[in-house]
């Protein structure tokens, strides 16, 4: 098998992508990162061996140009929120574009260009049952995207399904830390929902490890950390570590839907009804982490306190504003 030298990282400008790109460059690989807004990827421009290219991925021509000269593709494009679709559109435009249409376009572009290796990042909670593709449009659209990847006979694909991902620059624990800084208490939907958080550096290392590993071809892996937490426990830890622990009030079901419905009208919704639906299934793996991934994941309890030690939680709002998110 040909070793990877130049790699296309779709979604490389995002939270996980930034850590993946940084670890790839540390291993001496050349990396191409497309972004819709070059400004959002300016932190990558300074990295040696990274080419940041401003483009739209929707058209096949754009992808063909990007893939040409690369040996492998990593797809990290994803969105957490999307409007419901109209008749005949089960996912809604945002989820369909990012999670369903784009993976299909990537597969076709890889097949045309002869690039065989594709690592696709999906999400834990995606169902393998064709009769029940999951409780939310987020999860069902991720399942439809995975199906496009699996249907390709020509590609050496690997699909990864992470649980919630934490890191100093994450959007999850930082959101709850920021809420506790601003509010006297936290009204929390689905406080008993469970997660098995994985550190972004571990996830990035697993991705980099498996790029040139043929034993991972044609396989789907859950990517999880060593501990399971309820949402209430995660919110409590974020409050404690950021120095603003607040009382957490679990919302009864029904009220939580109403609150999520109001929140999803915000320009940057902290929660949507679809997010609530995603949390109706445990975000926990039923299997031990595969040794093929080559990582021994760190504990959130060990990494978490340091994540908030440098004032990252206070800067998070500024980062989102700068990124127009
Ligand atoms: N973070 C988590 O806890 C978590 C958990 C499970 C699964 N995942 C999955 O992991 C992947 C990466 O997540 P992340 O947290 O790093 O996300 P993120 O920070 O929001 O980054 C998303 C990336 O996708 C790109 N993107 C979004 N919509 C796009 C579109 N319509 N067309 C082209 N590019 C688009 C963005 O690029 P530009 O804005 O620069 O164009 C950005 O680079 C996603 O597939 C996500 O579903 C994440």
Image: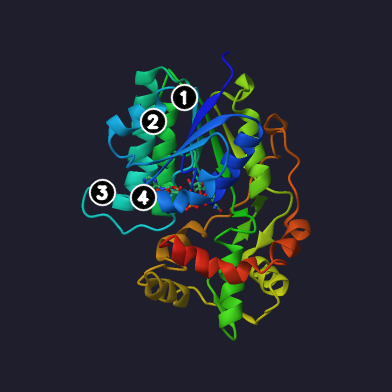
Farthest residue in the bottom direction? Answer: 184
Gap in Å between the C-alphas at discs 2 and 1? 8 Å
Upstream in the sequence, badge 2 or badge 3?
Answer: 2
Residue 317 lies, in percent from the top left, at 52, 69
Name the element at disc 4. helix
User: Which quarter of the figure has residue 59?
Assistant: top left
User: Which quarter of the figure has residue 35?
Assistant: top left
Residue 108 lies, in percent from the top left, at 34, 26
Residue at (72% x, 57% y) in the render = 300
Q: Which residue is mark 1?
A: 70
Q: Nearer the viewer, mark 2 or mark 3?
A: 2
Gap in Å between the C-alphas at discs 2 and 4? 23 Å
- Whether pointer 2 and pointer 1 mark residues with C-beta atoms closer than 8 Å, the reply is yes
Q: Is residue 56 left or right of residue 323?
A: left
Q: Is residue 308 left or right of residue 193?
A: right
- Whether pointer 2 and pointer 3 mark residues with C-beta atoms closer than 8 Å, the reply is no
Residue at (65% x, 53% y) in the render = 197
């Amino acid at each position: 098998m040909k070793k990877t030298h130049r790699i296309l990282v779709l979604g490389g400008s995002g939270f996980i992508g930034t850590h993946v790109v940084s670890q790839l460059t540390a291993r001496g690989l050349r990396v191409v990162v497309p972004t819709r807004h070059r400004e959002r990827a300016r932190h990558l421009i300074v990295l040696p061996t990274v080419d940041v290219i401003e483009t739209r991925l929707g058209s096949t021509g754009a992808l063909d140009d990007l893939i040409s000269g690369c040996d492998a593709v990593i797809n990290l494009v994803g969105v957490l929120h999307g409007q419901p679709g109209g008749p005949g559109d089960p996912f809604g435009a945002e989820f369909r574009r990012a999670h369903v249409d784009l993976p299909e376009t990537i597969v076709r572009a890889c097949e045309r260009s002869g690039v065989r290796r594709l690592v696709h990042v999906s999400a834990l909670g995606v169902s393998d049952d064709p009769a029940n593709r999951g409780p939310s449009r987020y999860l069902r659209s991720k399942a439809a995207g995975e199906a496009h990847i699996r249907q390709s006979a020509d590609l050496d694909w690997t699909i990864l399904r992470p649980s919630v991902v934490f890191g100093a620059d994450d959007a999850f624990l930082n959101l709850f830390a920021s809420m506790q800084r601003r509010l006297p208490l936290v009204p929390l939907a689905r406080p008993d929902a469970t997660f098995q958080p994985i550190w972004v550096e571990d996830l990035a290392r697993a991705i980099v490890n498996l790029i040139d590993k043929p034993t991972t071809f044609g396989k789907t892996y859950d990517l999880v950390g060593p501990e399971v937490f309820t949402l209430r426990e995660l919110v409590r830890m974020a409050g404690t570590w950021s120095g603003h622990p607040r009382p957490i009030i679990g919302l009864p079901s029904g009220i939580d839907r109403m609150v999520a419905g109001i929140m999803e009208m915000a320009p940057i919704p902290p929660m949507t009804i679809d997010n609530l639906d995603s949390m109706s299934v445990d975000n926990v793996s039923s299997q031990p982490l595969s040794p093929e991934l080559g990582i021994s994941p760190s504990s959130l309890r060990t990494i978490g306190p340091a994540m908030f030690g440098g004032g990252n939680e206070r800067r998070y709002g500024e980062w989102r504003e700068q990124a127009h998110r």
